Image (spheres, rainbow, N blue to C red):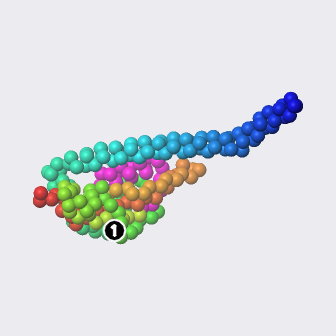
Amino acid sequence: MKSIGTFSQIGAVLVAGVIGFYYVQPTINEIGAIQTDIAELQLERNKIADINNNLDQKLATLQSVSRSNKEKLATYMPRLVDDIAVLRDLSYIMLEAGVTNTVLAYDGIQADRVSVLSEDDNTSSTLGDLQPTAHSFTVGVQGDYLAIKQLLSLLEQNEYPLEVHQLSLAADEFGIMSADMTLVTYADDMVLVNSN
């Protein structure tokens, strides 16, 4: 009789081991995977919260611009964009920077571009009732690092409010860099200051 009891105890231990191996272990692995997913989700939520806080700070800074500065901006922005004049000025800037022009083209009005100067359809906005009209230009240049750096500096100091929307840089084995960029300037079709 003792041998049957020993066999049943060994059988019970084997059954418990099989249950543990085929049921409990996969459940523990699944719980571990879920905990890893939760940790990754929390990390991403923290990143999103940081981005939102940064955006709120930038929006508060933008909204703190005084009415007189907005009026100055309205006098700074051109009423319309003369694409030929902008292309000519870009050519002069490239010549002054010492880069070789490879591409210079007017891409037209960009209705899908949103300026940093305007918000959505927020009627209480102090930034403007209408969004400015965005005009896009494609520029491609070649030169050394300092010449391309000088070009970007001159673009920043230009009399047009130019934004660099896309920029790609590449260098060849001889140290010559090529830069392809999309520049956007705006025409003041908008009223920058509400009457409120």
Q: Quadrant of the C terminus?
A: bottom left
Q: Where is residue 145 in the image (x, y as percent from the top left)?
A: 47, 47
Q: Where is residue 117 in the image (x, y as percent from the top left)?
A: 27, 56
The residue at the point 46 percent across, 58 percent down is 180
In this view, 108 is above or below 177: below
The residue at the point 54 percent across, 49 percent down is 175
Please check the rendered image and state whether residue 144 is part of the magenta-colored stretch, yes or no: yes
Q: In which quarter of the image is the N terminus?
A: top right
The amino acid type of the residue labelled 1 equals Ala
The residue at the point 72 percent across, 42 percent down is 19
- Picture quadrant where residue 119 is located: bottom left
Q: Position of residue 132 (x, y in %)?
A: 26, 63
Q: Main secondary structure of the magenta part?
A: helix
In this view, 104 is above or below 179: below
Which one is nearer the viewer's eye here, 94 or 195? 195
Secondary element at image label 1? loop
- Picture quadrant where residue 193 is located: bottom left
Horizontal relation, residue 113 to residue 72: left or right: right
Horizontal relation, residue 171 to residue 54: left or right: right
Q: Residues within 10 Å of mark 1 (few under 14, many from 20)?
A: few
Please check the rendered image and state whether residue 10 is part of the magenta-colored stretch, yes or no: no
Asked if residue 72 can be seen in this view, the reply is no
Magenta part of the chain: 139-158
The residue at the point 23 percent across, 64 percent down is 130
Residue hosting label 1: 111
Horizontal relation, residue 90 to residue 68: left or right: right
